[in-house]
Each structure stands twice: as C-alpha cells, then as structure tokens.
Image: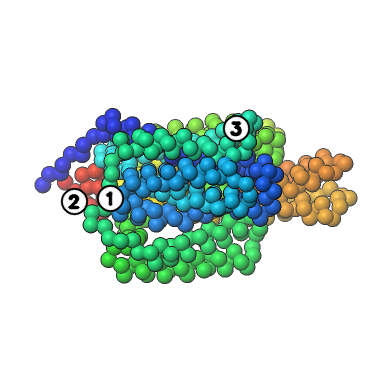
Amino acid sequence: MTTTSPSRAGRREWLGLAVLALPTLLLALDMSVLYLALPQLSRDLGADGTQQLWIMDSYGFMIAGFLVTMGTLGDRIGRRKLLLIGGAAFGAASVLAALSTSPEMLIITRGVLGIAGATLMPSTLALLTTMFTDARQRGVAISVWMSCFMGGSALGPIIGGVLLERFWWGSAFLLGVPVMLVLLVTGPLLLPEYRKPDAGRIDLVSVGLSLAAILPVVYGLKELAKNGPAVVPALAIVTGLVFGVAFARRQRRLPDPVLDLRLFANRTFSSALVVWLGFGVIQGGSYLFFTLYLQTVVGLTPLQAGLWLVLPATAMVAGSMAAPMIARRVRPGLVIASGLGVGAVAYLWLTGLDGSASLSVLLPGLVVSLIGLGLAAALGTELIVGAAPAERAGSAAALSETSGELGIALGVALVGSVVTAVYRDALTLPAGLPAEAAETAREGIASALAVAGRLPEAAPLLSAARDAFTTAVTTMAGLSALGFALLAALAALTLRNTTPPDSANHGHTMEDCPQRI
C-alpha cells in the first residue's frame, strides 16, 4: 500500500498566509489597545464604572460565545465565505464603534465586533490546513499565525499609546478598516474555498445551548476575578455547566452535530487541548499582573511598559517560529514538555523580584519563559488542528480558540484571587491612615496608589502597597512555575509518542495509526 505525497504550497499560498495574518494580528491588537483608550472614551461618553466594564467585556464575551458556532458554520457554508462576511462586518462595526455617541452604542458595537471576530479566528486557522497540506509547511504556517496573534497582543499598548497621543479615542477602532479592506480585496484572489461535503443545516437549538453554556461561565469567571467570591457569578457558572451538559447530550444524538464529540476520542487532540487550556490559565493570568507590576511598582507609563514588553513578545515569536524546525528532529510532545519546563524554570527565577532593580530580574525571566512557551503554544495549536479530520478543521480550530479564551478567563479569576489575597495579607498600612482610605487601599495596588495621590504624605502608603504587591507577584510566579512544571509532566506523559499529523493521513497520529505505511 502506498500513500500519495502531499502537494507543497507555492507562492499563492504563502501570499494567502500574509493575508490571513492581517486579521489575526488585528484581533489581538483589538483585545489590548482598548486598555489605554478606556479613560479617554469614558470621559467623552460619560461612561460609569459598570458601563466601562461592559465596554471592555462585551467583545470578549461574544468572541468566546460564538467561536464554536462559527467554526462549525465555516465548515458548512465555506471557510473563505465566512471569513469575508466576518471581515466586512468587522470593518463596518469598527467605524460605528469609532463614531459612538453614547456608552450603550459602544457596548453594542463592541459586541458586534466580538461576533465578527468569532468568524475570523477559526476561519483563518482552519484555512491554513486547506492551504498547507504538507506537514512541515503547515507547521511553519501555524507558527506564523501564532506569532501574529502574540505579537498583536504586545503591540496593542504601543500602537494605542501612539494613536491616543495624536488622535481621539476612536482612532483605536479605525485600525480595523484598512486591514479588512485588504482582506476583502485579496481574499477571493489568494484564499481557497473549503466546505464540508454534504453538510446539513446547522442545528439552531445547539447554537442556543452552546451560547447558554459558554457565556454564563465566562461572565462568572470574569466577575469572580474582579470582585471576589459572590453568589451571582457562582450561579452563572453552575448554570453554564448545566447547559453545557445539555449541549453535549444533544450533540451525541444528532447525525450532523455542531460539535463532533468524537474529536475527543483522539488522544492527541484531547491531551493537547487540556494542555492548551492549562497554558491559558497560567499565562493569561500571570502576564496581566507582570504588566501591572511594571506600571505600579517600577513606575512606568503604559506606553513605556508596552515598549519594554516588545522584547519578551519578540522572544515568544522566535520560539513559535523555531518550533516546527525543532519538531522535525524531536517529537512534538517532548518539545512541548521541554518548552513548558523552560517556562517553569524562568518563572521560578521571577520569584526573585524584590522591587529594586526589578527590570534586571523581570525582563530576562519573561524573555526566557516566553521562548519556551512559544515553542509549546505553536506546536500545541498545530497538534489540535492537525489531529482533526479535514472536514472538521473549523470545529477543531474553534475549540482551540475557545479553550484559550476560557483558559484566560479562568486564569484571570484564579490568579487574580491569589494575588488579591496575598496582597491583602502582606499589606501593612501606615499608622494614622483614615479608615476609608485604608479600606480602599486594601482593594488592590491600583486603588492604593489612587489613595496615596490624595494624601499629604504619600510615601509610607506607596512603599507598603508596592512591597505587598511585589510579595503577591512573587507568590504568583512560584505557583505558576509549579503549574507549568505539572503541565510539562502531563505533556511528556500523554504526548510523548505523538508525531506531527502528516498530510497523507491527516487527522491521525502515531498512537491512532500504529500500522501506518
């Protein structure tokens, strides 16, 4: 028995990869650029605290809620078609968001941006599996895709800072317009179309159940991260889990489900997905507080912090790009485990932060950790998507993205709770501080700095708050190091025999096909 050699990608496919990289970069930018614009737009629109939270969260909620649905929809109606529809909607919603005249209008347009973003993320990743059938080339393409996503997250604060120094807050949203115009013009010329053969209609009840499962869980996790333990967020999470069970049961009964649960029978797919979820929990939660540390303890402005973080982001891109080359000689499961192990060692180094000479400790630790974690992230995504059959690549890509979104939300909640608890326990307030000011200072480092700015003698409170937050961050780093070490052990155990899914037998790995010829 022989197998057909896969065709190698040519110039058109690599140009198509450049086209797909643009919306990927933009989506990552859009997630981080608003942090800097929020104070200005809140003043201009008169947004109160609750409205500010919804302006921030409506985008992420809609992305997380619609990823599974849009991944499956792309498999059915065509991945390129869905990508172009989503690109047009994203460009139009970007203009409306930039021209918003009220908080309510901005919340709604941000939600529409999230729904459009949910069409773009799985479509770009799934199209890569159609364009790059050669396993080695597909690995490079996915590494480029992952690098754009990581790089966009790091560039967001920098680009946002530059724009806000020269233009109004709406300019941050208008970034999406030229990118989507390029996509709409070049996409039909450079991107292939793919749809699942004999695809039936999408089950609307399943769509409703998936939204009812994901949205309450994401909402509950975000609320727990912001406000601590409370009844309503806990009930939201429980409600989401109940709907999740109902969704899973329905999928088992449908002949053509929205989410094919048989994907989880593939050991490579399920193991890589669990590792990716854990990665999102640890990295998504911890990186947020390292960024906050640069601003509150080291004293950098958001733009300065963003500029310093370019080096770690570049290191993660380098790790991602090196991953497929290393995986040619070393089994990808071992590369993933080694990358996570490097991350664990680097996070252990970060427990040495002490408030003095912080950059000399923080930057090397982040650079080394992100090189290793870049290796793990790129290969993990490739295994998840590559382990699925070609007609289910959209669903697999959506599950990868959903797992990452849920991981980050869970990470912010868990890591945020740990950091807050340690900060409050370590905070020693100066004598004579007014009771109201003391209560506010215990809420977190940002609140303490705000209170200190209103005191005639701010130095004692500033010193105490920064020392307490440093203790909290180093504790977080130690726990994160332990978490990455456990993930490395899990990857080494469950993915040790995994080989990159080859194109001649797409969707299968060594343990699935031991007699492959």
The percent coordinates of residue 351 (x first, y second) are: 61, 42
Going by the image, does 362 lie left or right of 92?
right
User: Marks 2 and 3: which is nearer the front?
Assistant: 3
Q: Position of residue 87 (x, y in %)?
A: 42, 43
Mark 1 → mark 2, Cα distance in angstroms? 30 Å
- Residue 32 or 154: which is nearer the viewer? 32
Q: What residue type is labelled 1?
A: Arg
Q: How many labels does the image show?
A: 3
Residue type pointed to by label 3: Leu
Choose top left, top right, bottom left or bottom right for residue 188: top left
Residue 71 in view? yes
Query: Is residue 494 visible in the rendered structure shown here?
Result: no
Q: How is the image coloured?
A: rainbow
Judged from the image, the secondary structure of the residue bearing numbered disc 3 is helix
Which residue is identified by label 1?
A: 195
Question: Which label is found at residue 515?
Answer: 2
From the top left corner, tell me how far across and down residue 437 is, in percent: 82, 51
- Residue 163's disc is 3
Distance (Cα) linking label 1 and label 3: 39 Å
Q: Do the residues labelled 1 and 2 touch (CB within 8 Å)?
A: no
Q: Residue at x 32, y 63 (%)?
A: 257
Q: Determine whether, in the image, residue 120 is placed left or right of residue 420.
A: left
Q: Earlier in the sequence, mark 1 or mark 2?
A: 1
Between discs 1 and 3, the one toward the N terminus: 3
Given this view, does label 1 or label 2 mark the residue nearer the observer?
1
The quarter holding residue 157 reads top right
Relative to 10, say whether 104 is above or below. Answer: below
